[in-house]
Amino acid sequence: MSLLTVNGVKKVYSTRFGGNKVEALKNVNFEVEEGEYVAIMGESGSGKTTLLNILAALDKPTSGVIKLEDKDLSKIKEAKIAEFRRDNLGFVFQDFNLLDTFSIEDNIYLPLVLAGVKYEEMNKRLKPIAAKLGILEILKKYPYEVSGGQKQRAAVARALITNPRIILADEPTGALDSKASDELLKLFADVNQTGQTILMVTHSVKAASTAKRVLFIKDGEVFHQLYRGNKTSEQFYQDISSTLTVVVTGGDNK
Amino acid sequence: MRLGFYPKLALEGISKNRRLYFPYILTAIFMVMMEYIIMFLSVNEAVAKMSGGDLLSVFMSLGKFVIGLFALFFLFYSNSFLMKKRRKEFGLFNILGMGKRHIGIVVMWETLIVYLASTVIGCLLGIAFSKFAELGLLRLTKAEADLTFSIPLNVVGTVSVIFFIIFVLLLLNSLRQVGFSSAINLLRSENVGEKPPKANWAVGILGFVILGIAYFLAVSVSNAISAVAYFFIAVLLVIVATYLIMIFGSVVICRILKNNKNYYYKANHYVSVSSMLYRMRRNGAGLASICILSTMVLVMISTTSCLFFGEEDLLMTRNPRQININSIKVSCETSDEEITDYINGIVVEAGETPVNPIRYSSIDTYGAYKNDAVYLDPSSMGGVGNVSFDSVCEFLIITVDEYNRINNANETLSGNDCFVYSQDTKISNTINFVELNQEFKVVRELDKEPLVIGMLNSATVTRPIFLVVSNEGIVESLCDLKTDDGYGLADQFYTYFFDLAGGTDKEVEIAEKIAQNEGLNDFFRTCNIESRTISRDDFFSSFGGLFYLGIVLSIVFTLASVLIIYYKQISEGYEDQGRFEIMRKVGMTQQEIKKGINSQLLTVFFLPLVGAFMHIAFAFPMIRKLLALFNLKNTLFFATTTLISFVVFAVFYTIVYKITSNAYLKIVSSKLN
């Protein structure tokens, strides 16, 4: 059974007075297996972020079903949704979303504190993650004191510390320089090696080429997908790149 | 095109930032209005004409000064707040190619528009309300009102000039801020990462120490004179301590909480402690100001209302009868009956009859009371400089004959025996009058004042001690006591209070007749005659005037607190917007967020109120002593007015809290849904 099932998801936005209707997602179907590392690619306006918001239960689809294992997201009560998100999902955002009033350490603890975990337990969990992410030295510092790459690694640590079923990453390299991007992507690959499921939305070919599978979204539909198989990152990069050209120039070879 | 461009830009700037500008302009309008009204009253003829009008004019001039000064500080506060928010806009103008000079012109136009709007509207409102204000004042002071309406143009002029100066200063300050920063600085000024405040232990603890000292001073003050002397020191210390505690002490406390890991890492403490840490540094000064302003309002309202509503009480203490005479006799030998007959003669001649008389003669003297010994002559203590004020007591001494006559008693005393009454001085078994070479033996402590002191004691700042002594020449020897320079050490007072059979009709006339009677000079060295009716008028004009001023200043200060609160909420709302959005994404439920917001708002909001309550509670003993100077000694009454003032203020404060926290919630939740 798949970890995440997305079936016939549709999202229609209407303007405030109901006049214009914009179809952000038309009909999205895909599945994610346990331990997969999936990248979702598409142009600006293709519906990537809308999809991610719906997966994160931050937004509701107009129709369609999203299941995490056998749990239907739309059946979860409004009051329980935050708790569900906290317990099952980890988030990494483009702009980090670290709180400037907390030290890096406290930022990482945030979801656990909300879940009511004891300090000793949190501290025990933090140590190996921080070591793996190379942020042990900056734990006591504040977000404004560290670099973008370090901030993003702290955000990854925050996502990992709850042992989520799946990590949702929204353009995680979007605000990083190329060196920090490479480091972060390597980190994602490593984390995935340990069995962590990752779903990443990006429009960076480089980022997508580290994933095991790439989904292409166009006009609110999954247009195409590529498996990495045994390809190297460079070969996979070429494949994604040429597929993207087809997607952008509008070939309809499916 | 060029002519209208800058004013248009300025107007647009104001209307776009109306959430910030609106309260600012409202404050300015309000300040102008208050200033106009107070100035109007200070030159008003009806006010000047009433009895005690001079005093009222002085009060009003004081009020006008306070409001003017306050308007300056306060408009500066709100303006700096405004400028902080506007900088980004100016930075954008700058990048789009507007020079600093041009931005300066926009700022100038904005200031001009705000000045004109507030002065015109403020003066119009002031004119509209001036008659109400006048009637209110006349009513409080129980003076006659007429129905003329006037608009003193010189007042309008003065107010305009005062506020023109204030706004020029504001403009200079704004221009300074624009001039000193580069375009990028202006653009980014709003989102600079901020260091978490370090706990400044020394300063934080110093705040608590200073507060402790101030409280100790207030509680330990033993008499009215030291209360006057220490009052301003205590006020100053409390103000300093409040600022130190709110700004630094609060950070120290948050740090302590944060270091307690089991407390800190709990969902409901986690967010609030860490954001309080930031909040207090930024808003500590604002909270301290609110606390101080609230305290001032409470002190002003509770004391002035206490005096105003306690007026009749005070009057009856000071003037127990309609006509009240208190005088120092030329010689101790003059018989009291002779004097009384003479005065009664004057009254009868005027066609009235004295009734309900209280009459007695007493020795009234001051001395240093120390180790059972009383020194009447400062030189015997080594000069006035060596006498500590705390040791000075007032001695009221009567013979046992007078005591028996006044109190319908039948006591006997002989030799050195005496009765003593004292409210709060500990009396030993013997009292040695050094200059008299006589040691009195206390045979009984009386349980109430042996005589009605009235105006004799009207502003007693020292502790009175009553002595009832035997008839055996003690009073006479006291009368004969002289310093080396020949001044009498103990005066004999003649006190005579009486009502008139015909009521108040002729009261004022008779009081004047007695006061003008030359024949009394044969009996009295000095003579003080008070009519209760005249005293009442004086009381009303002074206490009513004070109460009125108390109300006006309270309104001004309260408005200031409200505005500080409003600005604080708005600015925090903008700050917290993003923060709560992140927390929601990370998995905080809507309810948890709301709960967090509420508990935070409550803590920050009611901190100043709690502070004000503590200040008032500790100031209470000191203010009580000060009120004793006005002869107001009814502690329960003062406690009641204080409590009522506090409750009314707290209710009002809570209403303001509700309204402003709605503004905050609106801002915070605008991004949450």
Image (cartoon, coloured by chain):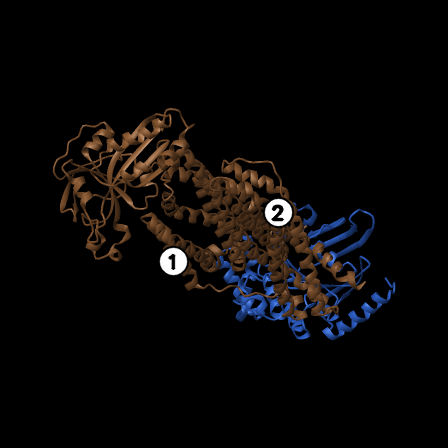
Q: Quadrant of residue B447?
A: top left
Question: Which residue: 66% across, 63% down?
Answer: B87
Towards the viewer: B658 or B622: B622
Q: Is residue A239 visible?
A: yes
**Tag of residue B209:** 1
The colour chain B appears in is brown
- When the figure is inspected, residue A97 is found, relative to residue B551, above or below; the finding is below
Q: Quadrant of residue B104?
A: bottom right
* Whether marks 2 and 1 lie on the same chain: yes
- Rounded to the nearest angstrom, the CA distance separating label 2 from label 1 is 51 Å
The residue beneath circle 2 is B152
Local packing at callout 2 (Cα closer than 10 Å; few below 14, some 14-19, many 20+) is some
Image quarter hosting the N terminus of chain B:
bottom right
Q: Amino acid at mark 2?
A: Pro
Q: Position of residue B582 (x, y in %)?
A: 63, 57
Local packing at callout 1 (Cα closer than 10 Å; few below 14, some 14-19, many 20+) is some
User: In this rendering, which labeled residue sits more in front, label 2 or label 1?
Assistant: 2
Query: What secondary structure is marked by label 1?
Result: helix
- When the figure is inspected, residue A76 is found, relative to residue B211, above or below; the finding is above
Q: How many marks?
A: 2
Question: Which residue: 50% across, 62% down?
Answer: A124
The colour chain A appears in is blue
Q: Amino acid at mark 1?
A: Val
**Tag of residue B351:** none
- For residue B513, side relative to residue B554 (left or right): left
Towards the viewer: A87 or B502: B502
Q: Position of residue B472 (x, y in %)?
A: 13, 37
Towards the viewer: A214 or B188: B188
